[in-house]
Image: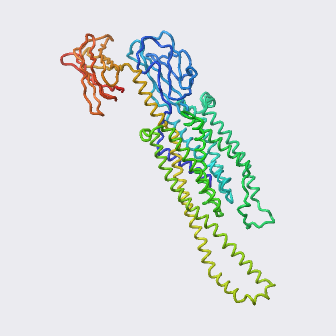
Amino acid sequence: MSAPRRAVALVALLGALFVLGGAGPVSAHSAVRETTPGEGTVLKSAPKQVTMTFTESVGITDDSLRVLSPENRRVNAGDTEHASGRSDSVRVPLDGGLADGTYTVAWRVVSADSHPISGAFTFSIGKPSETTAAVSAEPAVNSASGALYDIARYAAYAAVALLIGAATFVLVCRPDSAEPLRGLVRAGWWVLVASTAALLLIRGPYERGTGPSTLLDPELIENTLTSRPGWALLARLALLAGAAVFLVRLGRGAAAETEIPETESPEKEIPEKEQVRPKPVVLAVGGVLAVGLAVTWAAAEHASAGIQVPLAMTSSVLHLLAMAVWLGGLAALLTTLHRSEALLPAASVARFSRLAFASVAVLVVTGVYQSWRGLGSWDAVFDTSYGRILVAKVCAVVLLLAAAGFSRRWTGRLTDTGEQLRVPVLETVGARAGGGADSGPGAGSSSGDTGESTPAAAGDGSEDKPENESEQASAPGARRGALRRSVLAEVVVGVVVLVITTVLTGTQPGRAEIETAAAEETAAAGQRTASTTLIPFDVGTPGGHGKVQIVLEPGRVGENTVEAVIIGPDGGIATVPEIRLSFTLASQKIGPIDAGLTNKGGYWGTSSLNLPIPGTWTMKVTVRTSDIDQVSETRRVKILR
């Protein structure tokens, strides 16, 4: 199989693992910390603006916050903007003279690590209204656009590993021939260019939650090109253009250096110390290009948000480079072992072994730091999605290290064998040269002095030579075969590690998830003052229908006050003989708890309803309109801590 086909097969494998692993929506990497007005609050007067604060900095557009009246009419008085120069807080001014009722705030922003998030909340002026604005419950990311975006990200990770890893293998390990790797490097470059261009087009629909049909929307493309992720992708394309020039010149220079002068024999072996080494300027330019490519990832993902951003971005760059050198180098080594017509020198394998060991050391150090930064506590290891995926990655890396250990062992044996093979080869050549001299025209006078010993030596050599050569040839061959198998195992497990890593970059860090949950709970506990539920009912008799409005205050664990009001068919307040209310938490086998409502003259209520634990309770209300006519309805209500 040719190198380009191997690259295509690798990308196909990544896509297959992506599909099998599921293309669920990307986890939000930022969350709402606080809103003003608060969720569910009832204000005495209309606010002048709506403000939202998030757990990290967010990007916005003009309509990131949309405030809708009960009649579904926008009441924004201006565009959305960052509040007081803070990148984690946004606000939008409201029209003056807002009427009483329940208003809905629909919001959509992009978190600092480039993932879009959205949601909605309500607040009321005066008193809650019977109707509220209808807001779409669609996810933040369109499923088709999200799948295309993730596939492009997977392909980009695989391509950068192939490109950097294969180029590093050629420059550092210096195999006798780089020809088998040219196709691998070209395939990595082309796939990375194509995936980066695809990300530039898909980014707009991905952020706005629209489908692939809007890929070429000029407005979305303009928004992408003026955003930080767009700048990173443009920088990546520019670096790839520079990398193309670098690789072409490098290939021409290598071809010129490997030309054999006519005065020298093609079979003449170049001593190790005389092998051409890359010039320092070549290594420097290649290093700058590789670091630049890695920075384009760090600038648009987890490292660019949260704590210790400079240190995190440095760690992310080193982590990506070490991954590319190791996994891409493995692909290059496997390709060379299988496709090279000449045997790969043991010295080249030994160089890659040392290079891989250094890469693993960098991966361990940076991985530990990134894990600490992403988790923040031991509780986040198994209590968050990020922690569980990280555990899976660690297990896969352990398997990868085990396979690498086998490869390193076979590399050592192959190196030892290579050193031992040089001696008998030189002795055989010397013996043949000596034999030729003895048989020459000037050897007649000395033949008699050595005539007894020479045939014996020749006879011994003719008997032992085939067996020794067979053993010497079979031992290195067996070791190379074992090395090929262990490297293939490394590549397979490495692909799995790469897939898990890509999934991990699309998952909210455990530290942020725990902080977000705590912030949401604190905000909800501090802001929520009441829970209002409007339930239609119909007992099936003339005039026996209407609505019951139940206000539960404060809607948290402990004692609550309940007020239940009947709204008749004409929209006015009505009276009924009896209203019963109970609460059940089936998941904890609690209830039904009778609220014990009593007639308060115009409404039914109680001030002593005690709900012991938080959760989503089932509220059952029974309305009796006569001695024999009654109906029961149920609704789910969330009780906060």
Residue at image coords 50%, 40%: 372
* Vertical relation: 93 (above or below) 639: above
Q: How is the image coloured?
A: rainbow
Q: Is residue 558 visible?
A: yes
- The part of the image, by quadrant, that contains residue 3 is bottom right
Q: Is residue 1 visible?
A: no
Horizontal side, residue 469 vs residue 454: left or right: left
| Closer to us: 255 or 596 | 596
* Location of the N terminus (image quadrant): bottom right
Q: Position of residue 123 (x, y in %)?
A: 43, 18
Q: Position of residue 93 (x, y in %)?
A: 53, 16
Horizontal side, residue 215 vs residue 632: left or right: right
Residue at image coords 74%, 61%: 274
| Closer to us: 153 or 45 | 45
* Location of the C terminus (image quadrant): top left
Horizontal side, residue 287 vs residue 359: left or right: right
* Vertical relation: 460 (above or below) 320: below
- The part of the image, by quadrant, that contains residue 453 is bottom right
Q: Position of residue 312 (x, y in %)?
A: 57, 38
Q: How many marks?
A: 0
Horizontal side, residue 105 vs residue 172: left or right: left
Residue at image coords 68%, 43%: 288
